[in-house]
Image (cartoon, rainbow, N blue to C red):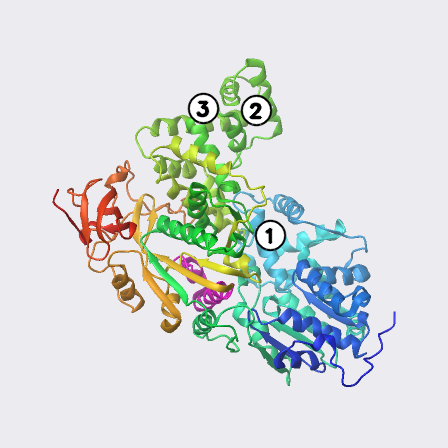
Amino acid sequence: MTLPAPLDSADATPPWLAGLNPPQRDAVLTTEGPVLILAGAGTGKTKALTARLAHILFSRLAWPSEILAVTFTNKAAREMRHRTELLLGPMAEGLPWLGTFHALAAKMLRRHAGLVGLNPQFTILDTDDQLRLLKQVVAEAGLDEKRWPAKQLAGLIDRWKNKGQLPADVPSGESFAYADGANGGGAGLYARYQQRLISLNACDFGDLLLHMLTIFRQHADVQAEYQRRFKYVMVDEYQDTNSAQYQWLKALVGPARNIACVGDDDQSIYSWRGAEVANILRFEADFPGAKLIKLEQNYRSTPHILAAANALIGNNRGRLGKALFTTHADGEKVEVTSVWDGPEEARLVGDEAERLAREGASLNDMAILVRAQFQTRLFEDRFIAIGLPYRIVGGFRFYERAEVRDALAYLRLVQSPDDALAFERIINVPKRGLGDKAMASMHAAARRLGVSLPRAAAALVEEDVLTPAARRAVKSFLTDLARWRDQAGSISHAELAEIVLEESGYVAMWQADKSTEADGRIENLKELVRAMGDYPSLTAFLEHVALVMDNDAANDDDKITIMTLHAAKGLEFDHVFLPGWEEGVFPSQRALDEGGTSALEEERRLAYVGITRARRRSHIINAANRQVYGQWTAALPSRFIAELPADHLTMRSTMSGGPSLWRAALDGGDPFAHVGRGTGRGPGWDRASTSGGFGRDFGPRSAAPPREARVSAVSLAPNPSFRRGARVFHAKFGEGTVFHVDGNKLEIDFAAAGRKRVLDSFVTLKEA
């Protein structure tokens, strides 16, 4: 392939430079030496990166095969190739080194596999295969896999590989943390795992980069070959690189130091995946004399949205610093609304979404961005109730998640002793030593006796068909089920669910799981227990779930999107709702406990990402109360709300007395100092708990009080004079009629303001 001829006229503007602003143009034309392009949200960084690639090729500075262009996802790689094709035509097909870190590293490793003991036809293991192999390694070491789960070891090895560490490089303290140092600890088992991989002619994803780092360290000639080959190195999303990716990139940069990294330190939100924001912060130290180019003109959002985002992220110390601006019209201010509780939050978002849709907005242009997946449940329930179409992006709908379905199977079996599908799903979850042979025997007995699978299992306990160990396991499980059914008549169904999940060992199973998703699974189980408190019985709750699961998700109608803030990075919507901005939820208390100041700064970056997803409207919501195990606890507004500039906000509250309470919280006071706090606690499944306990902190267990006796943590004693149908007067909302009474919390239909939820102390009874 030959390079294209240069443009005929020296005065002609190259097509790849058309429409670029001055900093973007600078990023394209600065081809020599190290360049860091600090690209803020919505500033056209992909356009600049693609134009730079086109400029290098059209200027005959390099052949297509002499450019290494690295992205993080296959989608990003396809987007860059597509845009390059629009500028260059067929030449874009000749870019053999445009792809993801793993794809490019695999391509290199195929060429040099023999240098690390592999042959070029090596297999790349997926996560399931990797876990199966690690289970074998743990078993061969004589370790109890229940105490030392293979998933925990997989997480450790993944972290070490992300750091570019071989078994010999692992610090002794980190190694000792697994298996208490037995068999060489984690590092020793890591070494055995690597040996098994070589014997299988296989590697996992972490090895693709790690093996190449080993080759570069041990074979300088191979490293020099690639440095000569790649005249230009270009990297997208540099702030998301981990240590191994960072070392791999540095090893490929030749003496000319022609590396251009595009990224945004203010959008580094993946430390839990091994990303290190320090990589982008130290770029200028790694490459002395590097040119820093800031892309700050935002083409996405309104000035109010950008002003709020700039002020918020300005509180972070670990950043290079930039300020987004736009030439767009002002638009709406960022809206910050305080509501009474989570259900009202869901109602508010549903009402707003329907209003926007009536005004002509598409549901496809709306998104709800949550900090944690458990938050989606209330929105799903509300949207099902009002018939608002929705989609979950980046995960399953709440009741479709594996841990929720498992928990529901336990509850179905407690309620319906003959539920064979539920029995089969959880009879061996967590592991009870019942294999395929035991299950086949139970199915055969069910057919022979003409009874349900659970009844057949009970019959086999009295026979010699099953092994002694299997008989004991089945008998113990059936005994548990009988005990839970007996308890169901004397305690609330929510408390029953907690008992079942704890005593079955299901919660303990996830506590022992050290994978990154285990924390989220436990939070989802807590949310499931919370959800049950909204229904009068287990039967009513299970019926509700069945209706939710029947929601048609296959149609192609417009849908509002529900997703986590992490999953939303790189996306944009006209209207963005940001619920749950409360201390402990966002910023996440778990993150702060584990990561301190650095975690707080990442949480703030996550908030920045959330605000800047909005093109036209950003709506932040916080609730004054969150229901925990049937009782209410006070929730203070997120500290991030106080960091937003008042001039660019519209602040309101749906609560009587709410603005003053809320303002006190933002000003650093305690808005609930004048009232008693509740002591109710939710499921105490704390991952920090030690073995031998489930981390419970409930005090003596007793039957839960009836629902109507539970009152808010910020409430006073209820006034018995308020009943459904009573006429009342409110200083702000005027006259109304009581619709529902929950302790001293009233739902009132106001003639002028619609239905509101207020404390009874803020209204007066009107005489009949």
| Label 3 secondary element | loop
Q: Quadrant of the C terminus?
A: top left
Q: Is residue 343 left or right of residue 286?
A: left
Nearest the viewer among 153 and 31 is 31
Which percent across, then down, holds residue 502? 41, 39
| Residue assigned mark 3 | 417
Image depth: mark 2 or mark 3 in front: 3
| Residue assigned mark 1 | 154
| Residue assigned mark 2 | 467
Circle 1 residues within 10 Å: few <14, some 14–19, many ≥20: many
Task: Report the label total.
Answer: 3
Query: Is residue 391 placed above or below 446 in the rendered structure?
Result: below
Q: Main secondary structure of the magenta part?
A: helix
| Residue 472 painted magenta | no
- The three-letter code of the residue at mark 2 reads Thr
Query: Is residue 614 placed above or below 713 in the rendered structure?
Result: below
Q: Earlier in the sequence, mark 1 or mark 2?
A: 1
| Range of magenta residues | 584-613
Q: Are marks 1 and 2 in contact (CB under 8 Å)?
A: no
Q: Quadrant of the N terminus?
A: bottom right
Q: Gap between marks 3 and 1, in whole Å?
A: 38 Å
Name of the residue lying farthest toward the top = 449
Which percent across, then down, holds residue 441? 59, 22
- The three-letter code of the residue at mark 1 reads Ala
Q: Earlier in the sequence, mark 3 or mark 1?
A: 1
Q: Are marks 3 and 1 in contact (CB under 8 Å)?
A: no
Q: Is residue 596 left or right of residue 148?
A: left
* Quadrant in the picture for residue 433: top right
Which residue occupies 42% across, 62% down?
Answer: 592
